[in-house]
Amino acid sequence: MIRPLFAAVLAGAILVVSPLCHGALAEEPRIIDGIAAIVNGDIITYSQVRGLSGPRERLLRTQYHGEELDKQIQVARSAALQDLIDRQLIVQSFHKEKYELPEHFVDERVNDIIREDFGGDRNTFIKTLQAQNYSLTEFKKLELEKIIVSAMRSKNVKPVTMISPTKVTEYYQKHRAEFTAKEEVKLRLIMIPTRAAEGNQAAQKAIAEEILGKLADGAPFDRMAQMYSEDATRDAGGDWGWVERKTLAPPLEKVAFNLPPGRVSHVIELGTNFYILKVEEKRGGDTPSFAKLRPEIEKKLMQEETQRQQEMWLAGLRQKAFIQKF
C-alpha cells in the first residue's frame, strides 16, 4: 500500500519525459565500462554517465574541437555523474522512508509514451528500445525512478508562491542594465583617406569638406558614398546597418550615438582617415518600467528560491551518504 501522505504527492507529481539515450556516442566505437561512483553501496557505471551526457556531447562536438572539446566533454560528464548520484540518493531516500509505488503507475506511464510518441505502435516502441540497447525492463526501471524523483521533489521542495516586494524592487534596481534594450544606430559612413604620408592631407580634407557641402545641398548620402568613399561598404552606399555601442572607435561612436536620426556629422579626422557619418534610425536604450517587469522578476526570484531549496535538500542527502567517485 502507498502511505496516504505520499499518495497525494504522487498524484500531483509532474512527469517529464526525456529523449531515449543510452550507450556510447557514434564517435566512440569502443566503450570500456567500469564503476564511475558508489552511492551507499549502489554502483553507477561509466556507461550510465555516457548515456546521460550523450545528447549534450553530440552538441558539443559541433561547437568545439581539440583540447577545448575534451574540456567541455569532461564538464558534461561530470555534471551527468552528479545528476545520477543525486537521483540515486533520492531513490534511496524513497525506499528508506518505506514509500511504495504500485506497478500500474509505471505501466500506465509506458502506455502513455507509446500512445503519445509512437502513435500507439508498441512494436515500433520495442524496436526503438532494442536499437538503443534497452530492454523493456530497463526502460521501466528508469521510468520508475523518474516518477520517484519527481514525487520526492514535490514532497521535499515546496513551490514558492510569493516573493517579498522589497526583494523584487532591489532586484530591479540592481539589474536595470540587464533589462535595458541594446542601444543601436542605423549608420551610413563615408571614408576618405588622409594620405598624410604622401603630403596630400590638405587636399583630401578639401575633398571631404566638398562632399559634406554636397550632402548639405541635398545630395543622396548613398550616392556620395558610392562615388567617393574608400570604405569596404562603398558599393552598398556606405551602409553599415544596425551598429551597437563599442563597435566603432570611441570618437566615431560618440558622434554616431549623439546624432539625431536623419542628420549628417561634420568631417571627423581619426587616424589616417576622414569620416562623414549619417544616422538614419535609432533604437533601444530604453528600460521597461518596474510595473511592466515586476511579474517577470517575481517569477525569476521564485524559481531561484525553489532551486535553492532543492539544493539544500540534496545537500542534506549527500551529507548523510557515503559517496565515492572514481
Image (cartoon, helix red, strand yellow):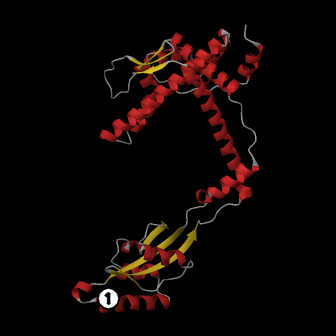
Task: Indicate the position of residue 79 as horizontal and vertical percent values.
Answer: 47, 31
Q: Residue furthest left?
A: 198
Type of amino acid under label 1: Gln
Residue at the image position 53 percent from the left and 82 percent from the top? 263
Q: Quadrant of residue 201?
A: bottom left
- Residue in front for this viewpoint, 290 or 191: 290
In the image, is residue 88 above or below residue 312?
above
Residue at the image position 36 percent from the left and 37 percent from the top? 71
In the image, is residue 230 above or below residue 208?
above
Q: Quadrant of residue 188?
A: bottom left
- Residue in front for this viewpoint, 303 or 122: 303
Task: Indicate the position of residue 11 as horizontal and vertical percent values.
Answer: 73, 21
Task: Indicate the position of residue 232 as horizontal and vertical percent values.
Answer: 34, 71
Q: Residue furthest front?
A: 319
- Residue in front for this viewpoint, 66 or 103: 66
Label 1 packing within 10 angstroms: few (<14), some (14-19), many (20+): some
Dot 1 falls on a residue whose secondary structure is helix
Task: Indicate the position of residue 261 as horizontal and vertical percent values.
Answer: 56, 77
Side of 126 relative to 276 (left or right): right
Q: Quadrant of the N terminus?
A: top right
How many numbered dots are placed on residues in this image?
Answer: 1
Q: In the rendered image, which residue does mark 1 sit on?
A: 204
Query: Does residue 5 appear in the picture of this structure?
Result: yes
